[in-house]
Image (cartoon, grey):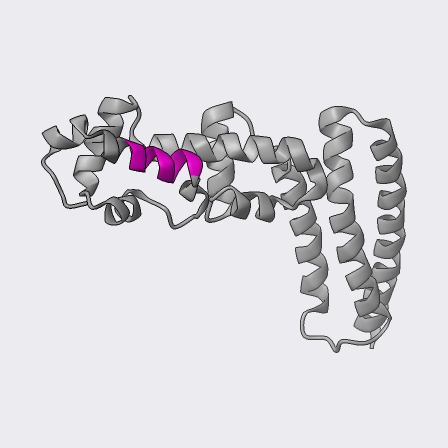
Amino acid sequence: MSKSSPLTFENDTEFEERIRKIIFIEQQYLNSGFGIEALGLEIGASPKELDKWFKTKLNEAFPVLIKRLRVEYLENLFQMYGGGLAAVDYARFSGFPDILSMNDAYWSHKGANFPLIETHFFCSKIESKVSDVYEGSDESGFGIDNYYQLKIKTKKLAGDFEKFYKSGNKAAGTRLRKGLMDIGNLCQDLREDILEKRKR
């Protein structure tokens, strides 16, 4: 389709059908690189013409519409999988370039953080602190094995954090308490190992 004047675009039903197909059926907005420029290249229109069309026909600016659609998709995805996916995966599958932009969009539409965001940053802090201690050490030994066990156990607890604190799931609370006790024991072993290494 060749470019037309804005007046023709407003009346062109084929143009409208192509836009609606790309956005609402093909859901190309789930690709983090999808923007008004990419849409314009695909249908042969300038970003300025498209921006005017979105504001006129859908009463919503293009970036606002895409952000809203991504948040709606994100919510549906979370209802299906809950804590079964990591926050990074939710961002990737719903078209956000990273976790922070996903949470910003979620906050602007829902007035709250995305449910897994606190868990993600809590787990990241634990992993970061432990990896700081073992950075540059060899890949064998008591401490490094416990470090990997700690990483695995922390990631496994992420779903139970959500289930317990957001939904009040008592079984998740039991698993969480046991998992935290295991992590506490691992942390104690790591502290003793670190102390031993410092004495050398």
Residue at position x 72%, y 59% in the image: 130
Q: Position of residue 159 (x, y in %)?
A: 74, 40
* Residue 118 in view here: yes
Q: Nearer the viewer, residue 110 or 14?
A: 14
Residue nearest the viewer, comparing 23 with 200: 23
In front: 51, or 8?
Answer: 8
- Foreground residue, 84 or 111? 84
Query: What residue is drawn where x is 87% and y is 39%?
Result: 175
Asked whether residue 114 is in view, the answer is no
Horizontal and vertical percent position of residue 10: 17, 27
Residue 106 position (above or below residue 123): above
Magenta includes 19?
Answer: yes
Residue at left 65%, top 30%?
Answer: 79
In the image, 112: left or right of 166?
A: left
Q: Quadrant where the N terminus lies?
A: top left
> On the rendered structure, is 84 left or right of 68?
right
Residue 94 in magenta?
Answer: no
Residue 145's quadrant in the figure? bottom right
Which percent across, then down, holds residue 174?
A: 89, 34
| Residue sitting at x 84%, y 50% | 183
Per the picture, the main secondary structure of the magenta-coloured stretch is helix
99 relative to 62, above or below: below
Please give the range of residues in magenta. Answer: 17-25
- Write down the quadrant of residue 51 in the picture: top left
Q: How many marks?
A: 0
User: Which residue is situated farthest in the front direction here?
Assistant: 14
Screen quadrant of the C terminus: bottom right
User: Residue 173 at what x, y percent from top left?
Assistant: 84, 32
Q: Is residue 169 left or right of residue 131?
A: right
